[in-house]
Image (cartoon, rainbow, N blue to C red):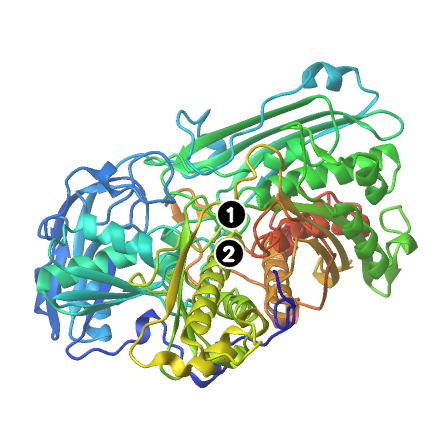
Amino acid sequence: MDQEQTVTGKSILRVDGPQKVRGEAKYAAEYNIPDLLHAYVVTASIAKGRILSIDLATARRFPGVVEVLSHKNRPWFWPVSFLYKDAAGPPGKPFVPLYDDRVYFSGQPVALVIAENYEAARDAAALVKVTYKAEQHTTDLAASAAFKPRKRRIGVAPVPHPTGNADLAFAVAPLKIESTYTTSPENHHPMELFATTVKWGKIVTVYDKTQSPKSVELFLKFAFRLIGRKVRVVSSYVGGAFGLGLRPQQSVFLALMAAKALKRSVRLVLPRDHMFALGYRANAVQTVSLAADEQGRLQAIRHRAVAATSQFEDAQDPMLLFSASLYRCNNIKLTYELAKLDTVSPCDMRAPGAATGMFALESAMDELAYVLDMDPLALRLTNYTERDQSENRPFSSKALRECYALGSERFGWHKRSRAPRSMREDKELIGWGMATGAWEAAMSPAPARAKVMVRSDGKFEVTSSITDIGTGTYTILSQIAADTLETTMDRVVIRLGDSALPFNPIQGGSWTAATSGAAVQSACRKLKSTIRSRAKHTGVLGRGQGAELLSASALIDLLKLQRGRKLSATATMFSFPFGKKFSSATHAAVFAEVRVDEELSVVRVTRIVCAVAAGRILNPNTARSQIIGATVMGIGKALHEDAAYDHNLGRCMAHGFADYHIPTNADVYDIDVVFVDETDAEVSPLGVKGVGEIGVVAVAPAIANAIFHATGERMRHLPITIDRLARAGSR
Ligand code: MOS
C-alpha cells in the first residue's frame, strides 16, 4: 500500500465477533417469515435403480402436511440436465433432485414433504412409501474400473506432463520404495447444517448457506425460469462450508422448488444424516514409487492415483499437482484416473486433491528416508527446489526452507532419535514425524467487484457479494478499507454475502483475501481520489493545505458530506496478470508428536508445530485461526473421519457424529502456528497468497509418519483408527 499502515497486518479481533456471540448474526435457517412452511426430504434407500411407485397419499393426510412432491408432480423445470451446470461443477450431467425416476445414490432425495411445521414434515416423510427396481450397484473403489477422464474440469490444474524416463530411472536406481496408500471418503460436516429459507413474493429472497450467493442466484433464476422476478440470495453468515457450499446444493434447489410450487415461503433444513449425501472428499488408491541415489537425491517419482467419482459426473481435483513441483527430480511420471461409483459426486473439500495426494507423497518420502537411513527433514532439504521444474519457471516466492528451519527449531526436531520405537514414556510410545504442505496461491479466475460509499453519518460503507464462511473476510476487508481510506476501523461499515451487492466470485480456493481484498483496496483508492478532488474544488481547505496531506475521513469531515451529493466508488479487480512468468504456491512444514498407548493403540497427537509461508498475512489472528482449524481437520483426516460404506447396501454407514468421528477438544492438544515472512509482489496486488487451505495438507502425513516413528508400523490407510493400528501391531 502507498501509505503507512495502521491496521492491516495486525491481529484485529473479528468485526463480526460481537454479533456472533450475541446471537445477532443470522444464518440461513434463522430468518423468521410469517406463514413459513417447512420441508423435509425423503431419501432413497437403494444405491442404484429406478423408482417403480411412490405413494404420497398417507403422508398427505398427516396433520399439518400441505403438499408432498416427487418427480411425478413437481413443478416444471428444464428437462435437459446439462443445463444445470454451475461454475464449480466438473464435466458430466449435474444431479438434479426429483428430476426423474432414476436413483443414482443412496440418500438421494426422492420426495419432499412440505408442512406447517418441521415436526409434521419430518414425521410425514416416514410415511412416504417408495418401491424400487434395484440394480447392481458399486460403491467399492477397488471393484470399479479405472479410466482417464475424457474431459478436464475447468479451473483445475492439469496433471503435469511426464519428464525424463521415470520407469527406467526407477528400475536402475539403487535405493527405492514403492507403496500403495488408500484413503476413506470424508464428509465436510460444517457445524451449520445446510439450510435454505425462501421468502416468496414479487422479489424472491433466498437465505441460503452457500459459498457464492451470486452463483446460486444465477443458477436458480435459470433453472426455475423466474422471468420477471427478482431473485436475491443472502448468505450474510455461513457456519463453515469447507467446499460443500461451492456448488448450489440440493437443499436450495428443493426449497425453491417447493416455494414455487406452492407460492409460499418455505424453509428446508437438512438434518445431519442427509448431509452425508451432498458430496464428499474423493477416496483414492495411490501408488507412489520413489528412487534415490546414495546421497538421497531423487532419481524417479512415480505417482498414480485412482480417485472416486459418481456415475454422472467426472469429479477432478489436483491430487498430483505437487508431486511434480515440490522436489527436484528429472524423471517424473504421474497418472490420474477415476473410477465410477454409485454415490453422489465427490466435491472439493479443503485443499481438494492436495490433502489426499500429499498424504501419499509425504508418507513415501518418509519411507524412503528410512531406506536411506537419512533424517526425513534432511531428505526434503536435499531435494529442495527453487524453481517449479514442472513448468520450468521460478516461484513468485517460496519460503519453504524458512518453514523447515523455523518449524523444526520450535519443535526441537534435532533431539529426535531416528529409530522407530526408540522414544517412550511409561506405557506410551512417542513418535515424531514431519511432512511438507503445498497449496495453490492464485487469484480467482472470475473478477471481483467492490463498492465503497460515504454514508450520511460520515462512515464508509464497503459492499461486496462475497461471503465470509468463518474465515475472517469481514475483518480483513474492513482492515484494508480502513488503511486505504486512512481512517479508523470504527468508521468502516461492511456488508457482504448478498447477491444484490457488487459481483464477486465463489468464496473458495483460498483466493478470497487476495481477490476481493484487492477489489476493496481499488474501490477505496478511487473514492479517496474523488474526495480529494472534491475537496480541492470546493475550497474547504485553508491556504497551503494540500488535500494529499489529509486522510479521506478528515476530508469528509471538512466537506461535511455535502448533503445530497452521493460520494461512492466501485472497482473491478481482474485476476492478477502474472501470466506464465511465475509459479505460485503456499507452503508449510508440519511437525507432529504422537503418543501411542502400546496396549490399547490409542493415539494422542500431543504436539503440532505448523510453519506456514503464505505471502503477506493481513491479520495474524484470523490467519492463525484458519491454520488451527485446518490442523484440527488434518487430525480428523489422520485418525477419525471415515465415511465408510456398507458395500452391500451401497450406503454410508455413518448417520451422525455418533458414528462419523471428528476430533473433539479432548483430541486436540498443543497446536503452535508460526508464519514465516514472505514478500511477494507478483502473486496478487496485496502480496497475499491465502491461508484457508494450506493448513490441512501436511497434517495427516506428519501424524502417520510420527505413528511409524513411535510404533514401527507403517500405516498406509487413512484414517488410522485404533482397530487398524491394533491389527497392524498384532501381525
Ligand atoms: Mo474450498 S474446497 O475452495 O471451499
Q: Mark 1 points at which residue?
A: 443
Answer with left or right where residue 157 lies relative to residue 377. left
In the rendered image, which quarter is residue 578 located in? Answer: top right
Seen from the viewer's position, the closer of residues 407 and 450 is: 450
What residue appears at the point 79 percent right and 50 percent down from the top-left corner? 402
In the image, 646 versus 8, the foreground residue is 8
Above or below 179: residue 28: below
Question: Residue 167, how many percent across, how many down?
Answer: 68, 17
Indicate the secondary structure of the residue bearing disc 2: helix
Dividing the picture into quadrants, the one containing residue 391 is top right
| Ligand 1 within 8 Å, label 1 CB | no
Q: In which quarter of the image is the N terminus?
A: bottom right
Q: Residue at x 21, y 77 (%)?
A: 33
Q: Which residue type carries mark 2?
A: Ala
Measure the alpha-carbon separation of dots 2 and 1. Answer: 10 Å
User: Which percent across, then down, holds residue 664?
Assistant: 59, 69
Which kind of residue does numbered mark 1 sit on? Met
Total number of numbered discs in the rendering? 2
Element carrying mark 1: loop
| Badge 2 vs badge 1, beta-carbon distance below 8 Å | yes
